[in-house]
């Protein structure tokens, strides 16, 4: 095992994939589910892995669990049921951590291209600073709109944001378990963009590490197709 002792990963896979039109994390490519691809780079670092799956469907859940267990992975594997929001799913995952856990890496199953290098850097920064989040610069101009909820027509532009001060945030995000638990205890039940935001809102500093462009998140059906092609090529 590399790096600090007592590392656990929480992999969030309880979403319904509304924008992709299917639960994208269970699509198969390169002989495995995307969930499997998203978990694998954590294995060298972790004592245990908590996988958060959608509620219900015991048979489907068994199948997912089987795939992960059949890989002969050494870390302890715990499978738990998620909630209606990403935040609730993460809370369910944290509740399943073992007492020996000191460091937590939280990752989206929708990011199957996470590299061992990025996991290493996030974990090192988390161990040094208590909370670490990967982020990359924003290439497009970004603006704020007047009424994002408007059903018909395009919303009106309100103002452009200052691109050099913006970052696009990724997972995995790394935390001392103590910091993450304190932040979650202070947080309400509203959804949050990610764990870094919860930790920041609780008043803890969040250290940034350089993310990777290759570590993009699958959101749409077209992106799912592109990801599947990549994974097929990678396994050929
Ligand atoms: N997630 C989760 N529990 C939820 C919602 C999301 O565990 N209630 C997970 C997803 O499975 C995904 C990650 O959080 O791995 C990032 O979420 P997102 O990309 O938004 O996935 P979905 O919520 O499934 O997609 P959508 O928002 O389009 O429905
Ligand atoms: Mg979502």
Image (cartoon, rainbow, N blue to C red):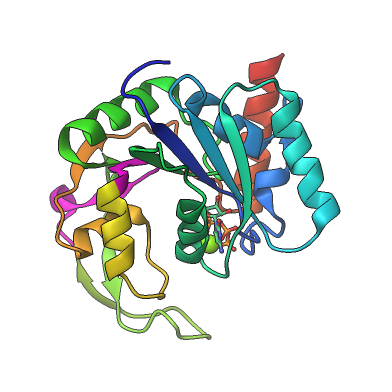
Q: Is residue 39 magenta?
A: no
Quarter holding the N terminus is top left
Quarter holding the C terminus is top right
Q: Which of the two residues, 113 or 105, is positioned nearer the viewer here?
A: 105
* Image-quadrant location for residue 49: top right
Q: Is residue 153 left or right of residue 183?
A: right
Residue 38, position as x, y percentages in the image: 56, 34
* Image-quadrant location for residue 122: top left
Q: Which of the two residues, 110 or 204, is positioned nearer the viewer here?
A: 204
Residue 6, position as x, y percentages in the image: 38, 31
Q: Does residue 63 show up? A: yes
Q: Is residue 176 magenta?
A: yes
Q: Is residue 119 left or right of residue 141?
A: right
Q: Does residue 216 show up? A: no
Q: Which residues are magenta?
A: 161-177
- Splitting the image into four quadrants, where does ligand 1 fall? bottom right
Q: Check the image and report above or below for 115 versus 178.
A: above
Which residue is most to the right?
59
Q: Is residue 59 left or right of residue 203?
A: right
Which residue is pictured at 38% across the width and 61% down the height?
A: 193
Residue 4, position as x, y percentages in the image: 31, 24
Residue 23, position as x, y percentages in the image: 69, 54
Q: Is residue 94 left or right of residue 167?
A: right
Q: Which of the two residues, 215 or 39, is positioned nearer the viewer here?
A: 39
Which residue is pictured at 17% across the width and 31% down the height?
A: 128
Which residue is pictured at 26% across the width and 59% down the height?
A: 182
* Image-quadrant location for residue 199: bottom left
């Amino acid at each position: 095992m590399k790096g600090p002792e007592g590392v656990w990963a929480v992999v969030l896979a309880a979403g319904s994939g509304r924008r992709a039109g299917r639960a994208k994390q269970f699509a198969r490519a390169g002989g495995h589910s995307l969930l499997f691809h998203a978990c694998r780079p954590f294995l060298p670092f972790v004592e245990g892995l908590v996988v958060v799956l959608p509620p219900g469907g015991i048979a489907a859940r068994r199948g997912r669990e089987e795939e992960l267990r059949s890989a002969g992975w050494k870390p302890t594997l715990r499978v738990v049921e998620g909630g209606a929001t990403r935040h609730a799913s993460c809370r369910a995952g944290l509740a399943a951590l073992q007492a020996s856990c000191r460091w937590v890496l939280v990752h989206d199953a929708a990011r199957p291209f996470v590299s061992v290098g990025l996991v290493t850097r996030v974990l090192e920064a988390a161990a040094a600073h208590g909370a670490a989040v990967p982020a990359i610069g924003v290439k497009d101009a970004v603006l704020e709109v007047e009424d994002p909820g408007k059903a018909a027509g395009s919303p009106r532009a309100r103002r452009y944001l200052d691109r050099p001060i913006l970052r696009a945030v990724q997972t995995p995000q790394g935390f001392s378990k103590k910091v993450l638990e304190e932040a979650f205890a202070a947080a309400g039940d509203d959804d949050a963009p990610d764990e870094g935001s919860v930790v920041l809102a609780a008043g803890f500093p969040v250290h940034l590490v350089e993310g990777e462009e290759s570590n993009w998140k699958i959101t749409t059906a077209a992106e799912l197709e592109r990801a599947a092609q990549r994974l097929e090529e990678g396994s050929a």
